[in-house]
Amino acid sequence: MKIKKEVNMCGIVGALAQRNVNEILLEGLRRLEYRGYDSAGVCLVDGEQQLQLRKSQGKVADLEARLHDNPAAGRLGIAHTRWATHGVPSDHNSHPHVSGQIALVHNGIIENYRDLRARLLGLGYEFASDTDTETVVHLIHSLTNEGMTLLEAVTAATAELEGAYAIGVISADEPQTLVCARSGSPLVIGVGIEENFIASDPMALRQVTDRFVFLEEGDVAQVSLEGIAVFDQHGEEVSRPVHKLDGGHDAADKGRYRHFMQKEIFEQPEVVKATLAGRIGAHTVLPEALGARANEILPEVKQVQIVACGTSYHAGLVARYWLEDWAGIPCAVEVASEIRYRKTAVRPGTLFVTISQSGETADTLAALRQAKELGYLASMTICNVPNSSLVRESELSLMTEAGPEIGVASTKAFTTQLVALQLFCIALAKANGMPADKEAELVGALHQLPELMEDFTGLDQLVKATSEAFAEKHHTLFLGRGVEYPIALEGALKLKEISYIHAEAYPAGELKHGPLALVDADMPVVVVAPNNELLEKLKSNLQEVRARGGELFVFASPRAGFASEPGVTVVEVPDAPDSLAPILYTVPLQLLSYHVALLKGTDVDQPRNLAKSVTVE
Ligand code: AGP
């Protein structure tokens, strides 16, 4: 079996109980909606041992409407949200796919589906969809026709698959069995009392259980009412531990907020505090902050290579400034989809650091797996999801404590990544001889962070008023200098992601090398302007914009000396220590994109074409 280590962002839920599981499956799908998808489906085995299949392009609500018109019930079922890869979003391409009495849901990509399809056509199978997935259900069906049980057929079929998969399979002929398997895509089994479940993410099952078995690469499992039997990639029955996940707050609840993104922006003071808790003393980063192994490894670090995607990549760019300034350690930062496809020269003593909210991003994971062959000193991940693939496969992990992030646009995950990175940079600088008074200054600032975060979220109404100037625009420029440049990049990413306004970010000093040609009265220019050593240089750059009729929106502290005037809107932000500015100035930019998206009426939490966990290459 050849396996390519990539996964896919669809959602799987399955249930076997002594009650109708339809609502459990639908609730599971609703909880997975944040991942991004374009169609949904469910299949149940009813009391007559018949498959009841309902599928719909669109949202889970469309599937519910279909179920309302044509109800289905059963004690065994599987359900799916699909993010199209092979075949357009449509009813017929939605999962579950069916062959005879067997139904299947799949996350991932089957790379040898063309060969399998040709073989199955030869056996007389007819295909109802354009998907790679449908080959798998016919393959399993063909094997049960040879007399295999469902478990045997799934085991034999998965041995033939090339690519990545997490699958859930049911047969109306075996109504007491739910079979699942994973390789390259995450899958968990939720353990209940005389009822058991499967899902691609534990969050889908938090309403029914808090106990989970995490399947490993190549595992096949048979789930019944009485228990779970797991077989490893060699077919040996193995015992996988049951993890109890703590209750936490229910992330699937928006509470008093209109959107998850809004809720997550306002949670930042609290989650930043949680990320610092137990990791800093009065004047120092505590030795236990990064763990015993980190304390052994950090003194050996001569260089750092950071790898991540999207917002997490921006967090890495910020860390580069901190590392080189405070620790004097060279740091390179690269997007995962680039580094994994080029030859890299690794110097001895280089620490490989990944940053990821989800811990499942395909490119970042692939880069980590590749790094293991390349002679890095060690691997470390900064991640928000315990038990995720990146955490399990990295030697060191530093968890952010953002709690589940549901909005596709990353907000609290980013600021907690910056907090964790700051702890890492201080610890590394300390191991490299940073004086105690510098550490005390940085840690002292971190103690002020939760309260300052609260003050910055308090800018909400001011930013809302400012957002009106953006709603009718088609292009925006974001400027920053130094460590604020990655914050400008992040601000531009947020705006384009959720309001669909084209936004670019530049280091302000680069303006005259090209982008100044774009500046006119129709292109608002957003400026991140803390009161630091680059302020005067930044002000000169802003003159260049004003001289071309560009309208400025400047986020600055009172000490920076900006004043609103025609063509210049100053959003005054609270004064803050330099070391915290990148974390804090992110907040008004998040609020800006949120309010602009509200004015534009876009889908804030699930912007078009995007998925929360980008688990395809
Ligand atoms: C940010 O708003 C994005 N949705 C996206 O760029 C995200 O940060 C990126 O896909 C990386 O995800 P990860 O942090 O889960 O690895």
Image: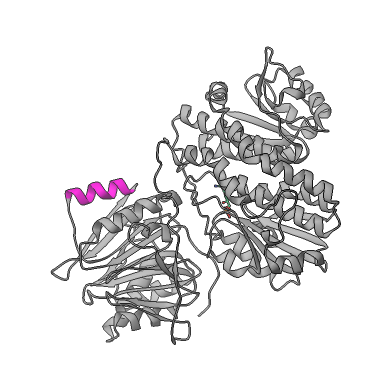
For this orientation, the residue located farthest to the front is 282
Image mark count: 0
- x%, y% of residue 229? 37, 80
- x%, y% of residue 567? 67, 15
* Location of residue 350 (image quadrant): bottom right
Q: Is residue 234 above or below residue 413?
A: below
For this orientation, the residue located farthest to the left is 48
- The answer to whether 562 appears left or right of 553 in the picture is right
Using the rendered image of the protein, determine whether residue 373 is visible from the camera's viewpoint.
yes
Q: Is residue 67 magenta?
A: yes
Q: Does the magenta stretch mainly form a helix, a strand or a loop?
A: helix
Residue found at x 49% / y 52%: 404
Q: Which one is nearer the viewer's eye here, 521 or 186?
A: 186
Residue found at x 77% / y 29%: 531
- x%, y% of residue 415? 62, 45
- The answer to whether 55 appears left or right of 533 in the picture is left
Using the rendered image of the protein, determine whether residue 325 is visible from the camera's viewpoint.
no
Residue found at x 48% / y 82%: 233
* Location of residue 370 (image quadrant): bottom right
Q: Is residue 121 magenta?
A: no
Q: Which residues are magenta?
A: 60-69
* Location of residue 206 (image quadrant): bottom left
Q: Is residue 516 above or below residue 277?
A: above
Colour scheme = one colour
Q: Which one is nearer the viewer's eye here, 124 or 250?
A: 250
Assign the C terminus to one quadrant of the image.
bottom right
- x%, y% of residue 41? 30, 56
Q: Which one is nearer the viewer's eye here, 360 or 610?
A: 360
